[in-house]
Image: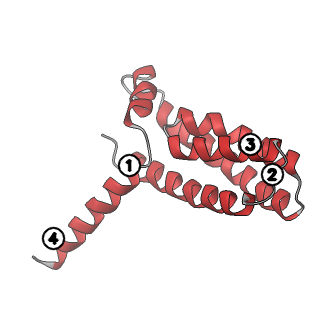
Amino acid sequence: MSIDDRFEARTGKARADAMATLDPQALERLRELDPGGQSKLLSRVAQAFDTSVARLLPQMTTALEASDLAAIRHVAHTLKSSSASIGAVKLSQLCADIEAQSRDGRIEGLADAIAAFTTEVGAVQGALSLMLDQPS
């Protein structure tokens, strides 16, 4: 196997791993709303998600440092639906869990949940980037 073949194999695996982060049925529903792609709906939704994340991730960090459960709940709630709409099911579930935990006043384990949330946000952003670079 040549270097190029090995690179392509790794790149293909990385793309498959990243795309497993997004629910294909949710993405297909978005594509159906813009069948020809003229409105670039998928790209606009992905950009809106990135913009929200850029604004809300620092708020989540600040809220966690301050033990501000209301702010944590707000960020988790805000990203829960937008995550689901782009097919980021795991991220949406993490948001729902963080929202419930903060609503119930359960501080224990919240930092770990938010760390998992932050990691998943990165995975989703990577998957969206790959998807938009190589639309199916």
Above or below, 102 against 85 in this view is: below
Q: Relative to 110, is 10 on the left or the right? A: left
To which residue does mark 2 refer? 106
To which residue does mark 4 refer? 5
Is the Cβ of the residue at disc 1 closer than 8 Å to that at disc 3? Answer: no
Residue 99, label in figure: 3
Q: Label 2, label 4: how many angstroms apart (C-alpha)?
A: 50 Å
User: Circle 4 — which element?
Assistant: helix
Q: Label 4, label 3: how many angstroms apart (C-alpha)?
A: 45 Å
Q: Label 1, label 4: how many angstroms apart (C-alpha)?
A: 22 Å
Q: Earlier in the sequence, mark 2 or mark 4?
A: 4
| Camera-side mark, 3 or 2 | 2
Quarter occupied by residue 26 = top left
Task: Tell me the residue at 15%/70% (across/down).
Answer: 5
* Frontmost residue, 75 versus 45: 75
Q: Earlier in the sequence, mark 4 or mark 3?
A: 4
Is the Cβ of the residue at disc 2 closer than 8 Å to that at disc 4? Answer: no
Is the Cβ of the residue at disc 4 closer than 8 Å to that at disc 3? Answer: no
Q: Label 3, label 2: how many angstroms apart (C-alpha)?
A: 10 Å
Q: Give the class, few, some or many, for how many residues have Cα within 10 Å of label 2's Cα (few <14, many ≥20).
A: few
| Camera-side mark, 4 or 3 | 3
Is the Cβ of the residue at disc 3 closer than 8 Å to that at disc 2? Answer: no
Tag 4: residue type? Asp
Q: Earlier in the sequence, mark 1 or mark 4?
A: 4
User: Circle 2 — which element?
Assistant: loop
| Camera-side mark, 2 or 1 | 2
Is the Cβ of the residue at disc 1 closer than 8 Å to that at disc 4? Answer: no
Above or below, 114 against 99 in this view is: below
- Percent from the top left, x then y, of residue 12? 26, 59
